[in-house]
Image: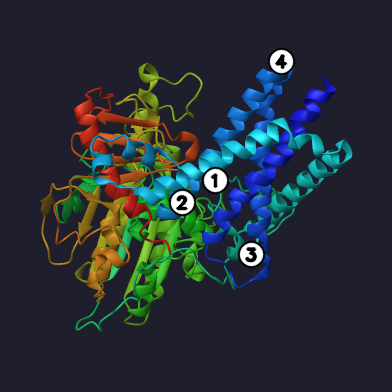
Amino acid sequence: MKEKFAKLFKIQLLNFFIIFLLHILFFLITPKSSLIYSNLFLVLSALSNAFMFTFLLILINIPFVFLGNTLQKIILFVTNFIVFVFIFVDFAIFRIYNFHFNGMVIGMITTPGFWDSVSLGFSTILLFVLVILSIVLIEYFIVNYWYNKIKFRHLIYFYILCILFTAFEKIGYAISDIYNLQSITRFTKTYPLYQPLTVRGFAKKILKIDVNKEDGFKITKSLLHYPKNKLNIAKPDKKLPNIIVIAIDSLRFDMINDEVSPNINMIRKKSYDFANHYSGGNSTRFGIFSLFYGLYGYYWHDFLNNRQGTVLFDALKEAGYDFKILSATLLTFPEFRKTAFIKIPDSIEDTFDTNDSTKREHIVLERFIKYRDSLTSEKPYFSFIFFDAPHARKFPKEFNKFKSSGKDANYLIIGKNNITDIKNAYMNSVYFDDFLVGKLYNYLEEKGDLKNTIIVITGDHGEEFYEQGHFGHNNSFGKYQTKVPFIVYMPGQGYKKISSITSHYDFVPTILSMVGVKNDYKDYSFGTNLFEPEKRDYVVSCNWSNCGIIDNESVLYFSYETHKSFNMTVYDENYKEVTDKNFINEKKKRLNKIIKEFTYFYK
């Protein structure tokens, strides 16, 4: 038995070198840094990731060492061959699209008619066949002959060395992440199934390291091509308006009415009401990202890894705006201090001397009023105000309009039949934040700012209470988790309802056009000007590893992570699974365009 285990480890040692050579292909096509340690990390992470594949193959094959010699060889050959082919095919995909094998690829190639419009060419097919034959031949000799040439003591040394350099690489990345070494963190998507190690919580709580420091941060080189062209900003011929964006966490579309939100509803009746509006995500980081970048949430991971700010604030700074960012919850997780607000850290207030979440909501309003009263120049200002009460379903007792115990949800027993108390608490918290929005509006009116201030009221995402089979958010792309109010108060304008499909990623093009940016919207966004609407058939909403392509009758749900490649489902408007193959294939045709857009802002 000892010999069989030794044989397994020897074979996988040789396979490690093949896997590493395949990883070198990814290394060769990745834009390098001018920093030696950055490129060294790229090599080290290739070694580490190759070893993780090798370790996986060992785990898969351990149960088969008890089989006969011939059967064990066959299984070893097959499993190793599958991994080799997977990595090579993934490289081909990565080289073309800059992302790894995922559900979009599966959906695209399984859509009827795809292969009619794609011609690989004889040379491509020939090269692929030659590579496959080479893999077969190499693996045959490894499994049958070459492994015998490895001495046992060399085997031990090799695996100890692999463990050491893998540990070194993981710790190196963790330290780089803590100290914002963008020259390292930007490489997390280079290799297939690569898993970075992050210990930010441990560093903050135990080691007392300031993991949220933005001061002095520098971008050395980015894998992103954002914006596509330098912004061309014309000097405005009139005074620019103030801009206030009020985002209420988990505020869904049907909460704007006289019962739950009378003040916001009053403002809505004086504003542009985008009644068919969707967030770019079903959770906070992806919703706010889509709002301030005008991009699909898919890009979040690489924008964070590259510590890439938004052109929105670049343009507003050049136009002379002052900034005040106020949040009732910390902007460190989600990491907006390292993304959207990375260039304006001194404008942020998100830490208050109280653990009472409802008091923080009041403080946010008070701080805005204090900020506004302190302004003496004629500079326009941009303020983002983020209320959090509906997310935690917290409210002062005097706002218990919709009778609720106010108790936290028991997630082990909560269900459709006992959700009423929890939903009432949610509506009470919306009612509470609506009160604060009303106070803010009245203050602006008394100050005279309504004459020259644009006010946007929206949610980062929605919140579901089993209306379509789910609870909360981040687990469905149905309308209750993605459809949010989007109310735009424009000075001197009255009420207008817009029923066409709009999205958070329309906000940036709208604002930039107002401040004189002349670039085509496609230079920095997937959106369009809200006031110059283009017909849109669908929007895209994303979370950590999945996206939904949403229209008025369906949601195409798919994953962009390799390990979830076969997660693809089409749902109808009630979020019931669709089985009609013709309907499904029609919706899947959109993936061709989405794939191109998912690669658009990479170098």
56 relative to 156 in the view: left or right: left
Name the residue beneath numbered marker 1: 192
Evaluate if marks 3 and 4 touch, with contact meaning CB atoms under 8 Å apart. Answer: no
For badge 3, the amino acid type reads Asn
Observer-nearest of 459 and 149: 149
Name the residue beneath numbered marker 4: 68
Q: Marks 4 and 2: which is nearer the front?
A: 4
For badge 2, the amino acid type reads Phe
Name the residue beneath numbered marker 3: 39
Of labels 1 and 4, earlier in sequence is 4
For badge 4, the amino acid type reads Gly
CA separation, marks 1 and 4?
A: 33 Å
The residue carrying pointer 1 sits among few (fewer than 14), some (14 to 19) or many (20 or more) residues within 10 Å by Cα, namely many
Evaluate if marks 1 and 2 touch, with contact meaning CB atoms under 8 Å apart. Answer: yes
Name the residue beneath numbered marker 2: 94
Residue, x 50% and y 55% (percent of image)?
331
The residue carrying pointer 2 sits among few (fewer than 14), some (14 to 19) or many (20 or more) residues within 10 Å by Cα, namely many
Q: Position of residue 105 (x, y in %)?
A: 38, 41
CA separation, marks 3 and 4?
A: 45 Å
Evaluate if marks 4 and 2 touch, with contact meaning CB atoms under 8 Å apart. Answer: no
Residue, x 60% and y 54% (percent of image)?
24
Quadrant in which the N terminus is drawn: top right
Of labels 3 and 4, earlier in sequence is 3
CA separation, marks 3 and 1?
A: 18 Å
CA separation, marks 1 and 2?
A: 9 Å
Of labels 2 and 3, earlier in sequence is 3
Quadrant in which the C terminus is drawn: bottom left
